[in-house]
Image (cartoon, rainbow, N blue to C red):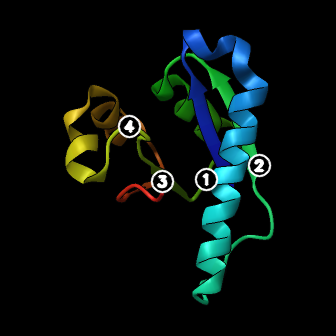
Amino acid sequence: MFIVHALEDAQENDHGNAEDRIRSHVERILAELAGTGVEVPAQFDLILRSGGILAAMMAVEKEFSPDLAAFGRTARTGLKALIQGSDGQLLLAHQRSDCLVGPKLS
């Protein structure tokens, strides 16, 4: 499993802090899922990319050819918020793999 986080220009100098926060958040979610009996991956790779989310996701898709791309936003929740954004529309239009869109997990 790969987790991709696109860093905005303002976050460029904060790679380490962003990586720690994201790893902690994903590990907590995976632990919660494991507690419900859901099979979760033993590990995950975190990929930090500079620039916009579209360029980051397309580069990762080209490099790794995933079977499924799941994406969302941290600032908004749900399908409606994702589809309203231009990044969400572009991601859905340009991803070559299957896409999963779901509510925010927190």
Q: Report the residue marked by disc 2.
A: 45
- Mark number, residue 79: none
Q: Spatial distance from mark 2 to mark 3, Cα to Cα?
A: 14 Å
Give SS at disc 1.
Answer: loop
Give the camera-side residue of 69 and 12: 12
Whichever of labels 3 and 4 marks the residue nearer the N terminus, that label is 3
Name the residue located 27 percent from the left edge and 27 percent from the top edge.
86
Whichever of labels 4 and 1 marks the residue nearer the N terminus, that label is 1
Whichever of labels 2 and 3 marks the residue nearer the N terminus, that label is 2
Q: Report the residue marked by disc 4.
A: 75
Name the residue located 59 percent from the left edge and 76 percent from the top edge.
33
Q: Report the residue marked by disc 3.
A: 70
Q: Spatial distance from mark 3 to mark 4, Cα to Cα?
A: 16 Å
Residue 52 on image: x %, y %:
49, 20
Q: Spatial distance from mark 2 to mark 1, Cα to Cα?
A: 13 Å
Give SS at disc 2.
Answer: strand
Give SS at disc 4.
Answer: loop
Name the residue located 25 percent from the left edge and 52 percent from the top edge.
79
Of marks 2 and 1, the one in the foreground? 2
In the displayed structure, 3 sits above or below 88; it is below
Which amino acid is tagged 2?
Asp
Q: Report the residue marked by disc 1.
A: 66
Asked whether disc 2 touches disc 1, contact meaning CB atoms under 8 Å apart, the reply is: no
Mark 1 crowdedness (10 Å alpha carbons): few <14, some 14-19, many ≥20: some
In the displayed structure, 92 sits above or below 67; it is above
Asked whether disc 4 touches disc 1, contact meaning CB atoms under 8 Å apart, the reply is: no
Whichever of labels 2 and 4 marks the residue nearer the N terminus, that label is 2
